[in-house]
Image (spheres, coloured by chain):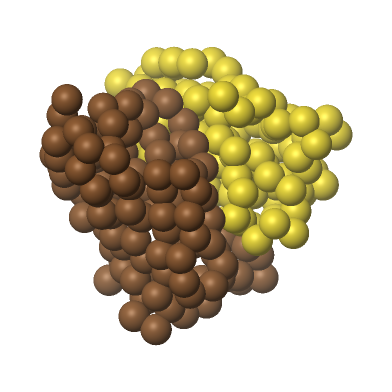
Amino acid sequence: ETGVTQSPTHLIKTRGQQVTLRCSSQSGHNTVSWYQQALGQGPQFIFQYYREEENGRGNFPPRFSGLQFPNYSSELNVNALELDDSALYLCASSLVGGGGREQYFGPGTRLTVT
Amino acid sequence: QKEVEQDPGPLSVPEGAIVSLNCTYSNSAFQYFMWYRQYSRKGPELLMYTYSSGNKEDGRFTAQVDKSSKYISLFIRDSQPSDSATYLCAMSGVSGGYQKVTFGIGTKLQVIP
C-alpha cells in the first residue's frame, strides 16, 4: 500500500452536477498528478500540480480543474458532469525532477454519472 | 496511431510459466519506461522502471527496453496465481515543457493454478 489516500471511494452523480475529489499525497512528495481511467482503458493524464500551480495538462476540457494545497494535498473538480465522465479517477504523488518514473497511486475514486 | 500500443489480452497461462508482456511506442522523446500492476478495483502499483536500453531484473521480474525498435517487454518467471492482474506499461517524456506520462491500455493476465 502506498501512502496516497483518496476520498470518497465511490460517488454517484447526475449529469450536469459538479463533483470534488480529494487526494492526500505520500509523505515528502511535492507533486500530484490526476488521471482518468475508463473501464478497460489505461489511465489518461488530466493534469499535474507542483507548488500549488498547474504544471502540465492533458487533453481535458476546462471544466476539469484542480487545486493543490500547501500540505501537498489536492482536489480535482469537475463541472457540468457528462455521462462519459464515469470512470476511476486516480491521483499519483511523486517528487519533482523524477522524470515521471516513480509515481505512487492512490486507490482511486470511482465516479458514476447517471 | 496511439503513442503507446499494448495488447489488452486476456492472457491466460498455467502456474509456473514464463510470461512475456510487451508494448510498442512511437514517441522517440520517451525517456523512462515503467511497468505497473493493477489489481481489480485498485490503483496501479509501480513494479519497476528503466531508463536506457537493456535489461533490468528485480526478483522474478525482468524489464527489457529496445529503443532502436521502440519496444519494451516485461518477463515474469515462475508465474503465480497472485500475479493475476492487469499489467500497464507507461512511458514518460517532456511534452509541452513538462514531464508527461503516457500509459498503455493494459494487458489482463490470468495465472491458472
Compared with B81, A29 (above or below) is below
Pick the residue in front: B65 or B56. Answer: B56
Q: Quadrant of the N terminus of chain B?
A: bottom left
Q: Do we see residue A87 in this rendering?
A: no
Pick the residue in front: B90 or B50. Answer: B50
Compared with B62, A9 (above or below) is above
Compared with A57, A111 (above or below) is above
Residue reaching furthest right? A70
Q: Quadrant of the C terminus of chain B?
A: top left
Provide residue B13's location: percent of width, then percent of height.
15, 40
Provide residue B63's location: percent of width, then percent of height.
42, 58
Which quadrant would residue B11 be assigned to in this image? top left
Provide residue A5's location: percent of width, then percent of height.
62, 23
Q: Give me the residue at 66% from left, 40% from top.
A: A93
Pick the residue in front: B30 or A114. Answer: B30
Query: With A92 as the anchor, is B15 left or right in this view?
Result: left
Q: Tell me, by letter, which chain the rendering colours yellow.
A: A
Q: Give me the residue at 82% from left, 47% from top.
A: A51
Pick the residue in front: A17 or B55. Answer: B55
Provide residue A39's location: percent of width, then percent of height.
28, 35
Q: Tell me, by letter, which chain the rendering colours brown.
A: B
Q: Give me the residue at 77% from left, 31% from top.
A: A27
Query: With A87 as the anchor, is B51 left or right in this view?
Result: right
> How many marks on residues?
0
Q: Do we see residue B100 in this rendering?
A: yes
Which quadrant would residue A23 be assigned to in this image? top right
Which quadrant would residue B90 be assigned to in this image? bottom left
Compared with B5, A3 (above or below) is above
Q: Give me the residue at 36% from left, 29% from top.
A: B39
